[in-house]
Amino acid sequence: MRSPQELTERFRSEGLKVTPQRQLLFSLLHNNTEHPTAEALYSTASEQMPGISLRTVYQTLSDLTSMGELGQVSIDNGPARFDPNITDHHHAVCDICGAIFDIHVDGTAKLATDIDSGFTPSSMSIVYHGSCASCVAA
Amino acid sequence: MRSPQELTERFRSEGLKVTPQRQLLFSLLHNNTEHPTAEALYSTASEQMPGISLRTVYQTLSDLTSMGELGQVSIDNGPARFDPNITDHHHAVCDICGAIFDIHVDGTAKLATDIDSGFTPSSMSIVYHGSCASCVAA
DNA sequence: GTGCTAATCTGCAACTCGTGCGAACAAACA
DNA sequence: TGTTTGTTCGCACGAGTTGCAGATTAGCAC
């Protein structure tokens, strides 16, 4: 995701307004690698801006997502989790604590599948499940 | 997933009862490659057994899943979809009609990732998104 | 076949996550 | 400073799923 400053410019250049609520969310998401849920962001945002509405959090996340500035990850029908990292990458999920880690995977182009030739793939995603370092240690 | 007969034996041997509702669901799932939702199974089941409860469908699907006889696939936070194919395989999803296809992928062992060495992976799943043959033709 | 008992079924309420709506509000700009 | 248009907020609603409790029934012993 771009920096809060760049997002501010982009929003304005597209005729969207830059409100304090949006600025707060821009900053909470910037460099955030925790793949937070909307609720988690709402909770953090509420500490800095009591009174902010969960509805606004959802709205802004949805705006960012449809602008392509924010990624969305869904794991096992849990709540949607948001990913400011929109570069090409995949995920590793700890089945114990639920943490999600960004990973890069090389060699995907060499995978051989029996996928029907009539199917036109446009993207693929890989999710590893397992246990993270802290949970293995515990 | 095992055959309805085998499932019947397994249920009984574990002290679980084999009811007409369960038998119906066993047969609806057997050799089913449509990755149906609970609602879809309920709808089909209702035709053959009017009065069957959606709650019972959920219950039985959940039982089969926790017994390892049935797989569960979640795509983009849509409703859970069930997969009687519990062999090692992956999925291709048509973004237009929503159909899910089972696929096999070779070469996954050769993938190189920068996954943290403290993370102990236990499984991985691959999902291709794209357009299926019928939707491309249309 | 009859009776017993624990498992199951069913319907409803409740719950989680997310969205639609409309009135009140505020950013952007002249 | 005023106007316009997008935004925020709260509430109600909707989909998908689960908890609960009373009625029902499979499985088994006799």
Image: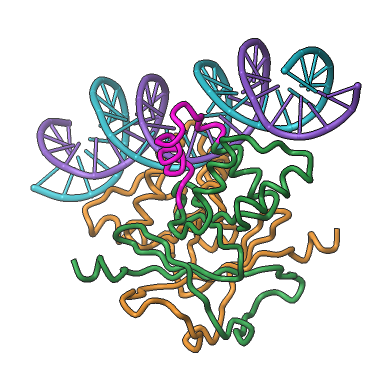
Chain colours: A orange, B green, C cyan, D purple
**Is residue B51 inside the magenta stretch?**
yes
**Is residue A21 inside the magenta stretch?**
no
Task: Give the quarter of the image for residue A75.
Answer: bottom right
Task: Judge left or right: residue C11 versus residue B44.
Answer: right
Which percent across, then down, holds residue D16? 47, 41
The residue at 63%/35% (across/down) is B19
The residue at 50%/89% (across/down) is A110
- Quadrant showing the N terminus of chain A: bottom left
Indicate whether A35 appears above or below B45: below
Considering depth in this image, is B86 or C23 the residue closer to the camera?
B86
The residue at 23%/59% (across/down) is A13
The residue at 85%/63% (across/down) is A137
Which percent across, then down, holds residue C26? 31, 36
Which percent across, then down, holds residue A9? 31, 60
Which percent across, then down, holds residue B40? 42, 43
Task: Give the quarter of the image for residue B58.
Answer: top right
- Quadrant showing the C terminus of chain A: bottom right
Considering depth in this image, is B91 or A62 the residue closer to the camera?
B91
Number of callouts: 0
Q: For the magenta stretch, what is the residue range?
A: B36-56
Task: Judge left or right: residue D23 versus residue A136.
Answer: left
Magenta segment, principal secondary structure? helix
Task: Give the quarter of the image for residue B87.
Answer: bottom right
Considering depth in this image, is B135 or C5 the residue closer to the camera?
C5
Considering depth in this image, is A134 or A69 the residue closer to the camera?
A134
Is residue A109 among the parts visible in the rendering?
A: yes
